[in-house]
Amino acid sequence: MPWVKLDDHYPDHPKLHLVGAIGLAIQTAAICFCGRHLTDGKLSFSDADSLIRSVLSPITDGEGVTWGISMTSGMVGRDADEFDWTSLMVEAGLWDQIASGFRVHDYLNYNPTRREWNELQEKKQLAGKAGGQASAKARAQAKSNPVPVPVPVPKPKPKKKEKEQVAPDGASLPEIDGAHIPIGTWFSWEFWPAYPKHNLKGEAEKAIRKLNPDNALRDRILRALEARKLWAESAARGAGFLAEWPDPHRWVRREQWTDEPPPWWGVEPYRPDPSGTPSRRPPQPLTDEEQAELDRLQNPQESV
């Protein structure tokens, strides 16, 4: 059965504060629905209505009393099912409106696609089948054939394979006069040290080898990593929300070096104040170092 990932800061996300506890329950049910049915984060109109009704359905206690969910403010209250929850989820930025219904925002940044999940299950099935066949064959041979007397056989010396260069800690990649650096060497010396999230290194190297970027694409990938680090630093200072770094192999497979800057990049951030009344904070200016780095990334030819 498929699974989904939830960040441990998920209940404290600012978007969920806009829809309250009921919105949190609806968002969790939507994420689980997409993972269970492998929809890549998509919800049809009917599916969205069904899961909202399921969350808001009344319960009956042991004494036969039926309880429903309502929202109150002082002496005033309304039943929860009187609200248009699909519109509230879209307005809060938790769902995106699409032609066929809705899409859970940033679902694929944390969860595998249908294709990735099916490929993983297929590999597990093939491995299990091959292991079972080999075990059955070995048992049959052990019953029908006597154990042969071992005869020492000289082993041929293995041929030495040329190893690609691996970067030691703190080392820099040596220049090769116009030559194409081997893909494994470039991964170890350039890409892996530049990517801030160091996990699943083997999967990341497989993704890079499959992509096999030329020199121009390699430069573009490294510039994109530097740019996203600047966005993350600005987001940490309160400029806006930026999703956490995905696993490196997912970042490569989805070609996220083509991502556009976040909508708040270079714009005064908009935040609700603690009383719930919308207000604006003073803009957070870039430091001199960040501005110089941004100019270099936007005009790479001039910095050469």
Image (cartoon, rainbow, N blue to C red):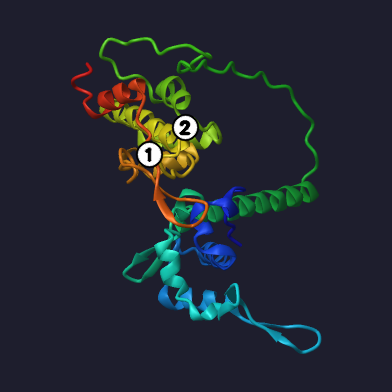
- Asked whether the viewer can see residue 95, the reply is no
Residue at the (37%, 44%) spot, across then down: 269
- Asked whether the viewer can see residue 302, the reply is yes
Q: Looking at this view, is 20 or 59 the one in front?
A: 20
Direction from residue 231 to residue 295 in the image, left or right: left
Q: Position of residue 13 (x, y in %)?
A: 53, 51
Circle 2 residues within 10 Å: few <14, some 14–19, many ≥20: many
Residue at the (43%, 38%) spot, across then down: 235
Q: Amino acid at mark 1?
A: Pro
Outermost residue, bottom side: 64
**Numbered circles on residues, count:** 2
Circle 1 residues within 10 Å: few <14, some 14–19, many ≥20: few
Direction from residue 141 to residue 42 in the image, left or right: left
- In the depicted structure, whether residue 299 falls above or below residue 66: above
Direction from residue 189 to residue 29 in the image, left or right: right
Q: Position of residue 267 (x, y in %)?
A: 31, 41
Please name the residue that numbered disc 2 is placed on.
Answer: 205
Residue at the (53%, 14%) spot, across then down: 169
Q: Looking at this view, is 75 or 56 the one in front?
A: 75
Q: Position of residue 38 (x, y in %)?
A: 49, 63
Q: Amino acid at mark 2?
A: Glu
Please name the residue that numbered disc 1 is placed on.
Answer: 282
Q: Position of residue 221 (x, y in %)?
A: 34, 31
Disc 1 on helix, strand or loop?
loop
- Return the disc, 2 or 1, that comes first in the chain's sequence: 2
- In the depicted structure, whether residue 115 falls above or below residue 55: above
Which quarter of the rendered picture does the N terminus lie within? Answer: bottom right
**Alpha-carbon span between mark 2 and mark 1:** 43 Å
